[in-house]
Structures are given as structure tokens and as C-alpha cells.
Image: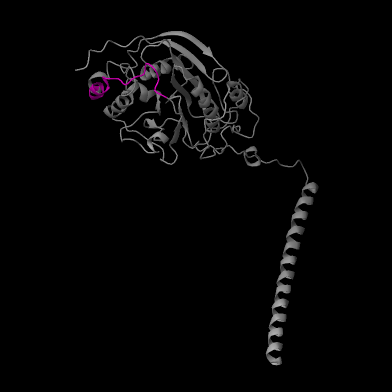
């Protein structure tokens, strides 16, 4: 019995000795690691010449996943940017993949959203909703066009979320709210045509046009609001559709075309009064001119819609299905070349340019049946 007990104690003592040895080795390693760090720290003070500073993008970080996050597009202070003078150096081209993007965003519509707050969050945005990155030169100049009537509540949320997103995407852009005057039937596509023409009147440099409904907010800032070789459909996975594309030819919500692509399809149709049909007509125009729709990954092209009742005087268009079937016959005569309207007011607000227009009245439809 005593021999067994003695053997057990011997094994315990050996285990304790090994643990002590291991602890000693760890302590020695940590000691030399701390010593090395201290040596590196003090050696910086003895280095000759001015110390190098970190690149702003590497030395600063911001959590932009919060709903009201408005991190500047670079570590440089944001100031209203101006056109470079004769002696000013031109910033380098903006990167294809902006380094300050966050990815998935938290989007909610419960917090109060006064315009004053949104303006404070975006000090670099100039009067009229114009912005240019201070530290790089974008490849495109983007006009964001919003068809609008009686949606002030939605517009505040749109401005709150989209301005920070567009700034992080390093875009040179302007925001245009095309407000339909009066209470006649709403005409989304015609308002988008008006926005295209009026934006170019203000700045002929616009070469990319993003057409966005005011109630749709992207849930990922990697969904870049740019134009490419083909027309772009951004809002491919809305929450109201279960974050899926409702059908293959869907082109509604948020889309983008270059100036050349827009003119190639003769713009958008002007004869879709009321809800529905115009986005399918636009899809037909793109297909008939030999172009194809490009889309982001479905995990990136997710959108939240601000819930609301259907607007008054925006009832479903009873002629929409017949018109969609006749796009090939109507697209050459009905479009950007035939749009008629009257500008009633142009108001440059701190975060957007409001253009109020009279686009006329819909024709009298024959009774159905």
C-alpha cells in the first residue's frame, strides 16, 4: 500500500514540476516580447527626421452600420468642394472598390427624422444636393432622379440614409426631386424623363442617371450607384417580395442607365398614367435595342420599403397591359423626344434640388367592357 502511495506522489511531483517549467518558459517569452515592444517604442524618439503619419484611411475607423452613421468618405476633413483652379492639383482617380464601405446596414423607420438633423449629418453636401469627394476624382458624374408627390416623410428618410451611402461610394452626384404639380393622375415615367432633361440643363457633365423611388432604401452600401456597360437594376430583392426578384423581367424600384443608354431607348414612356406598367415597358425597350439587364448579387441588392398606403390619384392603370404589348410600336414616338411639360419652380435646398413641374393631364380612357 505504501509503495503504491509513494508512486502516486512521485507522479504528482513530476507533473507539478513540468507545470512550473512550462510557466517559467511562458514568462520568459512574454518578458522578451514586452522588452521588444518597449525598445521599438523608445527607438521612435531617437529616429532622425519628422515622424511619418499613418494614411488617414488606415488610421481612422467608423462604425457606419448604425442607421444614422455618416462617416466621411475619407480621413480628410469634409469641406464643400470646388472645381480645381489653374494651379490646383487634380486628385487621383477614385478606386473601383471604395475602401470605406460598410456592407450590410441597419435600416429602420421609427426614429424621428427632421431635415435639420440630416443636414447636420452631411456637412459636405452642397446646396442643391451636390457632392464631390475631396480626395479623389470619380469616373462618372451621377444624377439621382426621384419622382415625387406628397411624400415628405419618406424623402427625409431617403436623404438620411442615401447621402452617407453615396458619399462612402465616392460618387460625384446631385439629387433631383421631380415634384408633380396638382392632383391629377401620377405619372412616374414622365417625371423621370423630366428629371433627365432638367439635370442636364444644370450640369451637362452628367453621364450616369439613377432613377429611384423615394420609399426604397438599400440595405447594403456595396450596391454601388454607378452605370456600366449595360443598364443596371439595383432593387432586385425588396422586403415586400420576400427579398426575391418577383419575375425575370422586373425592372422597377431603382435602376440606372448611362446617358447613351437612356437616349438609345428614347428615354421612358410618357403615356403610363397611374400605377404599374412603365417599368415593364422600359424593360422591353432595353431588350428591343439589344441590351441586357445587369444586376448585383441578390445578397447585396436587398432593399427595405417604407410601408404606406397607395397614393391617391395613383390607381392602377387599366391600359397598362395593352401598352406593354405594344412597346415595339410606340417606343420610337413616345419617349424623351416627345415629353412635354412646364417647369413651375426650381428650388435648391441644402440636401436636394426640388423641381416642381406641370406634366399635363391623362387622356380620357374609354369605359372598360
Considering the whole magenta stretch, tell me its main secondary structure.
Answer: loop
Image-based side of 49 in relation to 163, left or right:
right
Q: Residue at x 45, y 39 (%)?
A: 300
Q: How is the image coloured?
A: one colour
Q: Quadrant of the N terminus?
A: bottom right
Q: Quadrant of the C terminus?
A: top left
- Outermost residue, left direction? 369
Image-based side of 9 in relation to 286, left or right:
right
Q: Quadrant of residue 2?
A: bottom right
Q: Is residue 140 visible?
A: yes
Task: Indicate the position of residue 37 as horizontal and vertical percent values.
Answer: 74, 55
**How many numbered callouts?**
0
- In the rendered view, tell whether residue 137 sits above or below residue 357: below
Task: Indicate the position of residue 87 as horizontal and vertical percent values.
Answer: 63, 22
Q: Quadrant of residue 58?
A: top right
Residue closer to the observer: 167 or 139? 167
Q: Residue at x 38, y 9 (%)?
A: 341
Task: Indicate the position of residue 223 as horizontal and vertical percent values.
Answer: 46, 35
Q: Residue at x 48, y 19 (%)?
A: 176
- In the rendered view, tell whether residue 144 sits above or below residue 339: below
Q: Residue at x 47, y 13 (%)?
A: 355
Image-based side of 248 in relation to 154, left or right:
left
Q: Quadrant of residue 294?
A: top left
- In the rendered view, tell whether residue 207 sits above or below residue 46: above
Magenta residues span 309-326
Q: Is residue 82 visible?
A: no
Magenta segment includes 314 = yes
Magenta segment includes 259 = no
Task: Indicate the position of residue 212 as horizontal and vertical percent values.
Answer: 43, 25
Amino acid at each position: 500500500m505504501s509503495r503504491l502511495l509513494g508512486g502516486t506522489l512521485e507522479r504528482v511531483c513530476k507533473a507539478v514540476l513540468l507545470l512550473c517549467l512550462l510557466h517559467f518558459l511562458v514568462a520568459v517569452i512574454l518578458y522578451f516580447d514586452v522588452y521588444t515592444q518597449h525598445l521599438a517604442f523608445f527607438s521612435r524618439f531617437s529616429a532622425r527626421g519628422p515622424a511619418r503619419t499613418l494614411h488617414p484611411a488606415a488610421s481612422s475607423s467608423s462604425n457606419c452600420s448604425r442607421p444614422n452613421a455618416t462617416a466621411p468618405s475619407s480621413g480628410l476633413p469634409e469641406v464643400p468642394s470646388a472645381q480645381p483652379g489653374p494651379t490646383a492639383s487634380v486628385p487621383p482617380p477614385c478606386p473601383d472598390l471604395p475602401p470605406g464601405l460598410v456592407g450590410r446596414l441597419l435600416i429602420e423607420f421609427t426614429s424621428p427624422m427632421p431635415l435639420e438633423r440630416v443636414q447636420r449629418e452631411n456637412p459636405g453636401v452642397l446646396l442643391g444636393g451636390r457632392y464631390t469627394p475631396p480626395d479623389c476624382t470619380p469616373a462618372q458624374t451621377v444624377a439621382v432622379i426621384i419622382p415625387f408627390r406628397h411624400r415628405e416623410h419618406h424623402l427625409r428618410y431617403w436623404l438620411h440614409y442615401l447621402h452617407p451611402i453615396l458619399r462612402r461610394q465616392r460618387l460625384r452626384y446631385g439629387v433631383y426631386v421631380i415634384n408633380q404639380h396638382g392632383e391629377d393622375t401620377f405619372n412616374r415615367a414622365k417625371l423621370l424623363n423630366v428629371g433627365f432633361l432638367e439635370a442636364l440643363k444644370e450640369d451637362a457633365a452628367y453621364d450616369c442617371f439613377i432613377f429611384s423611388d423615394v420609399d426604397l432604401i438599400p440595405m447594403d452600401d456595396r450596391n454601388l450607384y454607378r452605370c456600366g456597360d449595360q443598364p443596371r437594376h439595383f432593387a432586385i430583392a425588396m422586403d415586400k417580395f420576400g427579398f426575391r426578384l418577383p419575375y425575370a423581367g422586373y425592372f422597377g424600384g431603382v435602376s440606372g442607365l448611362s446617358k447613351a443608354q437612356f437616349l438609345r431607348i428614347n428615354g421612358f414612356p410618357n403615356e403610363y398614367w397611374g400605377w404599374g406598367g412603365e417599368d415593364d415597358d422600359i424593360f422591353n425597350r432595353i431588350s428591343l435595342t439589344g441590351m441586357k439587364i445587369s444586376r448585383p448579387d441578390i445578397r447585396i441588392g436587398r432593399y427595405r420599403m417604407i410601408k404606406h398606403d397607395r397614393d391617391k390619384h395613383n390607381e392602377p392603370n387599366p391600359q397598362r397591359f395593352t401598352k406593354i404589348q405594344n412597346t415595339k410600336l410606340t417606343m420610337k414616338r413616345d419617349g424623351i423626344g416627345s415629353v412635354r411639360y412646364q417647369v413651375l419652380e426650381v428650388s435648391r435646398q441644402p440636401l436636394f434640388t426640388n423641381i416642381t413641374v406641370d406634366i399635363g393631364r391623362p387622356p380620357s380612357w374609354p369605359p372598360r367592357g
